[in-house]
Amino acid sequence: MITQIPLVYYLALAAALFCIGSFGALSRRNAIAVLMGIELMLNAVNINLVAFWRYGAADPLVDQAGIVFALFVITLAAAEAAIGLALIIAIYRSRDTVNVEEINLLKW
Amino acid sequence: MDVSTIIAQLLFFLVAALTLTAAFLTVLARNVFHAALALVGTFFGVAAIYLMLEAEFLAIVQILIYIGAIAVLILFAVMLTRGLMQHDQISFNHQWAWVALVVGTLFLGMFILILQVPWLQSGAAVTADTVPSLGQQLMTTYLLPFEVVSVLLLATLVGAFIIARE
Amino acid sequence: MDILSFILNPFVSLYNLIRDALTALLLSFGIASDVVAIIVFLVMGLIVVTAILILAPVLMMYTTLLERKVVARMQDRIGPNRVGKFGLLQPIADMIKFLTKEDIVPEGVDRVSHLLAPIVSVIPVVLSFAVLSFGVGMGAVDLNLGLLFLMAMGSMATIAVFMAGFGSHNKFALIGGMRAAAQIISYEIPQIFAVAIPVMLAGSISLNRVIEQQSGLFGLGWFFFYVPVGPIAFFVYLLAATAEINRVPFDLPEAESELVAGYHTEYSGMKFGLFYLAEFLNMFIISAIAASIFFGGWQGPFVQQVPALGIVYFFGKTFLLIIIQLWFRGSLPRIRVDQLMNFGWKRLVPVMIGTILFTAVLLWFYRGVLDYLKGLGG
């Protein structure tokens, strides 16, 4: 599997996923959809980390920095989702909307 | 190109196509619930990519955390804010065309960059089960980040509870 | 002698026989040996998958009969006894009923979610069968992360529940779906903690290694007997897993007096049949996991000499645990939502955190003593 697929394929896939995710994060109106875009971007980063671990590490068994980093990213994504969704629900309670364009109390 | 290369590459393209289709559906679907379901599909595709990269542990963790926890949280939030999900609502903001342009350019730039760098062509073989050594390293080399992440998770738990409390 | 060993270990011997015959046959056609290896791998994989896909529905059908019989006895009734001797053909009649019923799709449903939810609920359960070990050397896949895989598959059930609840366009289905999802993610935590105890004792997260570690004392060195951590972990696992699959006394998502039938209110015909299938297969899977990690799975006396006994031991233990769950159903009332959440978060989770700490200290102490004894000998 490793000798047959060049690293470039994984990098291109991750780049595409990252761009799709950033499009979603920047252009959706629903705050939950924005969060989904961010999750896609984090996944793209994880693919890169794991691919570089697999192709780049001299001994994948001894040097598992890529896997460890990906694990931390997954943990942080979980934390980010929990806090982000808690914020969205709190805003929904007080403002009755999850549209990011209407959440503009701090705008002058 | 021998048979195994063709099979492996076909498999990769199949998984990649499914992942990207699901990702597109996630950002394009009007119904946020459908977007969340497509997100679950994307997570599955990424788990399959991890399997192809021989990171079995990460693939299972991806299913357990991303699908079992994060996707469920997102679905919960979608349900709790359900009153707004009318189908005729416009799902993009007014700047989406600019965003599409910028993101497309970004992808083209990254793609050209990726093609020009002489990457390593293949990694060293994995000789044994990677999980015991991963656990060992989490408890020795990466002990400090590991502990910091656990404190962060605890803070998140308390913070999310306080923010979302009525 | 050959026939004797075949009788003592029928399924594995049959598998090896077919594999060797196929290899010899293909080699005699003059096909290259590496291509033969690929073909034999695929064909044998297909045979194993077919066997599992036949085994799963049959198990489910007879678990439903068992449930109806056992609960009937507890309520001083006889239970199904019209179709076949002792009602043994009743499950087949039920299946025919499911297949021939009209498939009603209510108006206003979210078609994608409504259609996909039953399928999504069955897939992870059937995938779980791949890593179970039914007897000596009788697992489809020897995954080195078997238990983690089983937990991941269990956590996927929430998605199907959400899809059914949202897709049905029905307030009872929606409330039932939300309740089920909240319950599943709450009880997943004590469940995974409870599974961590045998993993710590065995020093491996592979289901097969965990079973092999329980071979002491003539195949009775089960982790359940590691007092006090084994029994605590087992009872917490049993409760949490029962809650995870929404069965009595934790069946609030399907509380018929409040919610009609919960998230599958709007399903009929074979779509409801698939939910039914997933529910009973889930019951089998959690019983099989409990039997494997706490009661040694196929381990038992004389299993090394007579491997066929392993299958008997495994299914015997699994069905005993299923009957315990049916006993719950026959005797316990349903609990309230606040009781459910309090019990999960304020009782089970702290108990399991304490048990994990205690197990770690115990193992550390035990290892220290072993090192000391080794030092004395050397």
Image (spheres, rainbow, N blue to C red):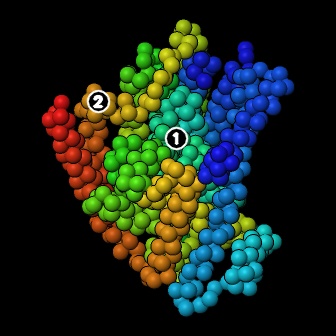
Query: Residue at point 31% right, 52% down?
Result: B157
Identify the image quadrant of the C terminus of chain A.
top left
Q: Give residue C55's position: percent from left, percent from top.
A: 67, 58
Query: Residue at point 57% right, 9% down?
Result: B116
Q: Are marks 1 and 2 in contact (CB under 8 Å)?
A: no
In this orientation, which residue lies closer to the viewer: C240 or C28?
Answer: C28
| Count of all numbered marks drawn on residues in the image | 2
Q: Is residue C316 above or below residue B160?
A: below
Could you tell me which chain the residue with mark 1 belongs to? C
- Kindly identify the amino acid type of the residue bearing the numbered disc 2: Tyr
Identify the image quadrant of the N terminus of chain A.
top right
Residue on which disc 2 sits: B142
Could you tell me which chain the residue with mark 2 belongs to? B
Q: Give residue C316's position: percent from left, percent from top.
A: 53, 65
A50 relative to B144 in the view: left or right: right
- Kindly identify the amino acid type of the residue bearing the numbered disc 1: Leu
Label 1: how many residues lie within 10 Å, few (<14), some (14-19) or many (20+)? some
Residue on which disc 1 sits: C143
User: Residue C32 occupies which quadrant of the picture?
Assistant: top right
